[in-house]
Every structure is written in C-alpha cells, then in structure tokens.
Image (cartoon, rainbow, N blue to C red):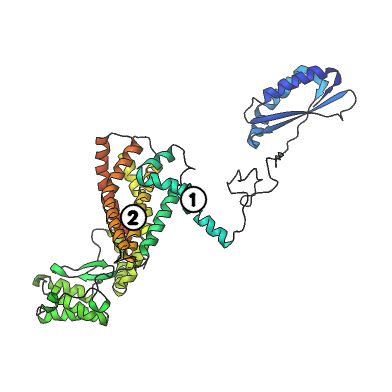
Amino acid sequence: MEADAAIEGPFDTWLRDHVADMLQLPGFRSAEILGDSSAPAGRIRRIVQYRLQDQATLDAYLREQAPRMRAQGVAKFGQRFTADRRVLAHREEFIRGAVSTENCLNCGEVLTGQHCAHCGQHAAARVLSLGGLLRDLFDDLVNFDSRLWRTLRPLAFRPGELTMQYLRGRRMYYTPPFRMYLILSVAFFLVASLGTDPGSSIVVDLSDGGANLKLTDGAEQSPSTGGAPTTPAAAAKPAPKLDPERQKLVDAVVAKLPEKERPHAREQLTAEFAKIKPGDLAIVKRAVDDPCGEQNMHIEGAAFLKKYEPQLRGACHKILSDGKGFGRALYENIPKMMFIFLPLMAAVMYVLYLGSGRYYVEHLLFFVHFHAFFFLLGLVVVVLERGGNYFDGSRAGTILHAAAGFAIAALVFYVPYYLYRAMRRVYGQGRLVTLAKYSVLGVGYLFCLTLTAVGLVFYTALTL
C-alpha cells in the first residue's frame, strides 16, 4: 500500500484497525505490518503480510469479502492511497533452535523436533545393524514400562477396561487393539505348532453302522508306528469271524493303507465290521468302494451349491490320499476363519444393543479385545504344556503340568465370567439385562462358530 506522507498518522491508525477486521474473517491466522523506506518522495509505503489457512480461504475472501474491505479504504482516503495484492505460497518456516533443516526420510516434510509432525517417524532414522534390529525387536519385551506390558495386565485381569479406555480416547498409552490381537494370535499358533505336526491323520470310524471321518494328531497309533502297545487282554481276545462279504470289505480297506499299518488296522476293522447291522452293509460297501462318488457325496436342498459338487468330490479324493495334508491346511486356515468370525460376532452384538447409539466398529473393537485375551490365556496354557512335556519326569515338569491344569480350569471358568464382566463394564447395563443378552450372545456365538467352522472345512477342501 502507498499513501500520501501528509496522512501518515491517520492512515497507520486506520490500517491497524483494518488488519484487525481482516483477522476476524474465517481462515485468517496472522498478519504482520512492514514498512518500506524505498517509497517515492512525499509517499509512504506499508506492506501487510497475511497468513491464511489454505487456498480455499483465499478464494472465499476474494469472492465474498475483498470488494467490501477495499471499499472501506477508498471511502476513507479516496485517491490519496493505492493498494495492490500479491499471493505467495508458503513453503517452509524456520525458527532458531526449534526446527531442523532436514527433511523426514519417510514423508519428506521438514522436521520440527525429534519426531516428524506429519507422519510421526523418529527423526534419527538410520540403517540398523543386526544388533540394533534385535534391540528394537525385543525392546517392548524387556522394557516393563512399554505399552505391551502396560496392556497385558488390564487385558488379563480387568475385563472391558481396554475397550473403555480406547473409546474414551486414551490410545497411545496402550498397544493398539488390532496389533495386540495379531501379536497374540500369531504367538499362540506359532507356539502351538512347535513340537507337533499340525497335519492330522484322517481315520474312518465305521462303528454303529455309520461311516464317519475324524481327525487324530497321531496319538492313536498302532504299535508298529510308535503308538501305545496293545494291552495283553486285548491281544489275547480272539478276533471275531466275519462272513465272506464283510471280510472282502475289510481286505479292500486294508489294501489302501501303508503296509506297516495294515496288521493293527485289520484287527480294528474286523472288530468294527462285525458290529455293522445287515441292513447297513450295502451303505458301508458303497462307501468303501467309492467314498467320494456321486451316491455318497452330493448336496441336497441348496441348489446354488450344486455347482461345487465336482470340486468337493475332487477334494475328497485328495483328503483320502493325503489326510495329513488336509489337516495341516485346515490348521493353517484357522486364522483366516477368525477374521470372518469376529465381524459376525460384532454383528450379533450390534443387534443385541440396537438403540444404544453405538457404532458397529465399537462392537468389533470389543470382540478384538476379548479374543486377544482368549489367545493370551491359550498361549499361557500351551507354553505350560510344552514346558511340562519338555521336562517330563522331573519336578519342574510336574509343576508345569499342574500349572497347565490350573490354566485350563481358568480357561473353562474364567473366560465366560470375563465376557460377562466385559459386557457390564463396556455397555453399562444392569445385571439381569446383561445376563439375558449374555445368554443370547452365547447362542449366537455357537451358531457363528459352527457356521465359520463349516465354511473353513469347505474352503480348505476346495483350495487343496
């Protein structure tokens, strides 16, 4: 701005009031008045530098306010002053001792302290040595003041506390819920798979005239495969004599087994086939001849699933030829099942608390914390059992087995109580109302668990 030197006093007074009015406009953050001694003789020059929130603020000012504000100066001083405008885009700001001239290695923003104000990365990012990487990895484990340890205590002993704290906005003090869930679930499945083969064997049970499949973890082995030996009483008991038709079925089943398993399997199958009722013999024969055939494996009552029958029969053949492979794939897909199961349970809880004003994601958060607790307790049980097996026969092994038994009892009795207390704390309803919803939730839990388990089996079979 330039004005006659004769009106310098009134002009400066008006200019200060004008700047104060400008700062009342939305999006105007600050202003600074600067003098310029290079003005022509008989004139004064003032530069006003405004800081605006964003480009949208400037556009709104130019469109709605600029003509009115300029008109005020013209009405006051007429042609005795002139003004022009320049728009400068803000790039960077430096304050002595408060900022760094370096940029964040993650997002490129100028650093303003020990952490980037834009993305949160530490300013001292560096290429880690192996030792530094391991220190970062185990820092949360050995530092008992870390978020991990601060989170485990309320997770284990204060049902619903973490959910309440998160919903209240206290989120940096504790480990984020989904991260905690992933850490504990991965740790649980990792430790549970140590020292055991997650691939189970498939065993055909033909008792009571039926044909059922069951999974075993290898504990029920024949003497030839390292299992428990047959008791003397059982060994002395003579095998029942079968008619030619039943004997032929036994021979057909035994022929499909590995040679080292055949003697023990023949003994078991002879005993089982002797119990089959004559009317069920045709069904069993059909199952033995082609267990995955169209007569034995077909879908009824669900037309949209009929197109999957060929894939299911193909999967059936793979399962029978490689039972351990199917069991291993089934075990590996359990974490995927949980990512479907949790949203289903959150939907059940959403229905139970309709009208409470809570969002679906709040119920999902509740079950993320609850299942993180479940994996934590399960992890304790597995660690104690593995430790007891490792030190089996010693005093330490006895103590660990006893501790595992106590943890299992806690799993049976404490988990239902934990869920009830968490519902009371998070949702804040009375005992009777909470108990009624707790009962309905139990039914929904069983239904959703069965639904996802069946889906797990079908998904595993179709993706073998």
Query: Is 88 left, or right, of 232 in this rendering?
Result: right
Can residue 353 be seen at all in this image of the molecule?
Answer: no
Q: Quadrant of residue 461?
A: bottom left
Callout 2, which amino acid?
A: Gly
Would you call the spot at circle 2 few (<14 residues within 10 Å), some (14-19), or many (20 or more)? many
Query: Compared with residue 27, is residue 216 higher up or lower down, i.e. above or below?
Result: below
* Foreground residue among 217 and 27: 217
Q: Nearer the viewer, mark 1 or mark 2?
A: 1
Query: Compared with residue 241, is residue 128 higher up or lower down, i.e. above or below?
Result: above
Could you tell me which quadrant the N terminus lies in? top right
Query: Compared with residue 233, is residue 422 higher up or lower down, i.e. above or below?
Result: above
Q: Quadrant of residue 59?
A: top right
Q: Earlier in the sequence, mark 1 or mark 2?
A: 1
Work out how far the residue at label 1 is from the one at label 2, CA to CA, in angstroms: 23 Å
Q: Circle 1 is placed at which residue position?
A: 143
The residue under the point 63% across, 35% down is 56
In the picture, the disc for residue 346 is none
* Foreground residue among 314 and 442: 442
* Foreground residue among 431 and 451: 431
Could you tell me which quadrant the C terminus lies in? bottom left
Would you call the spot at circle 1 few (<14 residues within 10 Å), some (14-19), or many (20 or more)? few
The residue under the point 67% across, 22% down is 21
Q: Residue furthest front?
A: 395
The residue under the point 64% across, 43% down is 113
Can residue 332 be seen at all in this image of the molecule?
Answer: yes
Residue 425 image offset from top left, x and y in percent: 34, 38
In the picture, the disc for residue 378 is 2
Query: Is 188 left, or right, of 416 in this rendering?
Result: right
Query: Is 103 left, or right, of 121 in this rendering?
Result: right
Q: Quadrant of residue 5?
A: top right
Residue 393 image offset from top left, x and y in percent: 29, 67
Residue 35 image offset from top left, x and y in percent: 81, 28
